[in-house]
Amino acid sequence: MENSREIQTRIKSIQDTMKITNAMYMISSAKLKKARKSLEDTEPYFQMLQGTIARIVRHLPEMEHRYFEHSASGVHEEISKRDSKGLSCIEDYEDKQQKKKGFIVVSADKGLAGAYNHNVLKLTEECLKKGQDNLLFVVGELGREYFMQHKIPMYTEFRYTVQDPDLTRARDISDFVVSLFNEGKLDEIYMIYTYAENSMKVEARVQRLLPLQKDVLAASMLSGAYAEDIRMVPSAESVLENVVPDYVTGFIYGALVESFCSEQNSRMMAMEAATDNAEKILKELRMKFNRVRQGAITQEITEVIAGAKAQKKRRRKA
């Protein structure tokens, strides 16, 4: 059984740990408020860009562009062109045309955030298993360390800290992956990040950035909205060439901020749970310390009484 000094040492250690967890909780809370504010300030602009793309799709539904997903009819036309070479079914076409996918993964630079990093990395591994020609783009120190330890090849590592997301970094990432898409090195680009549904729940998500899906954009427009006439100068294609990369930049920035907010939210919950557990342990240790101290006092009293009785017997014998 532990003595009182050992129990006091443990109590002091836990109290020091509680000071750290409380401080980390307060720091994460302040960072969360700041990140939310920056996202709210820039979100309307990128929502406007998405609305602009949706309006172009609504006015020109048949327009084909490399930034838009090819329709099923286009696939069948391509198959018919290749029938002479022995490709006679959709499965053969898909096998020969294996899509090259790129995944932008956002992890944290630090731990102590509950299951935040685990969920993102687990989802990434599941996505990578579904294809062969996948390229991995990693943001965050823990993600880089994890993929290096598991010998999962990374196409590039964005050496940015995720603790301070800004538009400059988001634009650098966007320019890099969009250039690969334009060069034909990627057929699809996905973003794997963490979204905070509310203050109590965060969820790892996979979102496709390119090519854009016309049906999703059309669904984002309000039903019955006024279909105004628009004129695109010099052409709709040139407008898309400028608007879509900015939209991708905005989505990446939003994902970086959402991931950062989710990380701080997860860390706050983890630190709060750690503080609550520490308080429970302290309560148990204090009770244990009181019992040990009471037992020591009782033992001392017993020894004093026994000594007094022994002295009394000696005097009687003398």
Image: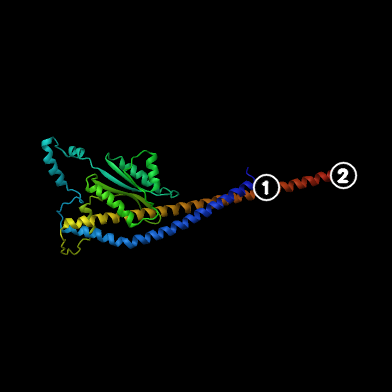
Q: Quadrant of the N terminus?
A: top right
Residue assigned mark 1: 295
- The image quadrant of residue 197 is bottom left
Asked if residue 261 lies left or right of residue 222, the reply is right
Residue at (86%, 45%) from the top-left corner?
Answer: 315
Residue 64 on image: x %, y %: 16, 51
Answer whether labels 2 and 1 touch (C-beta < 8 Å). Answer: no
Asked if residue 306 lies left or right of residue 271, the reply is right
Q: Earlier in the sequence, mark 2 or mark 1?
A: 1
Q: Amino acid at mark 2?
A: Arg
Q: Residues within 10 Å of mark 1 (few under 14, many from 20)?
A: few
Residue 288 on image: x %, y %: 61, 48
State how many labels appear.
2
Q: Circle 1 sits in a helix, a strand or a loop, which is it?
A: helix
Residue at (27%, 60%) from the top-left corner?
Answer: 47
- Coloring scheme of the render? rainbow
Residue at (36%, 43%) from the top-left corner?
Answer: 122
Residue assigned mark 2: 316
Residue 284 on image: x %, y %: 57, 49
Query: In the drawing, what numbered circle is on residue 74?
Result: none
Q: In this rendered view, identify the residue nearer to me: 32 or 297.
A: 32
Q: Quadrant of the C terminus?
A: top right
Name above or below for residue 12 compared with residue 1: below
Residue 84 visible? The answer is yes
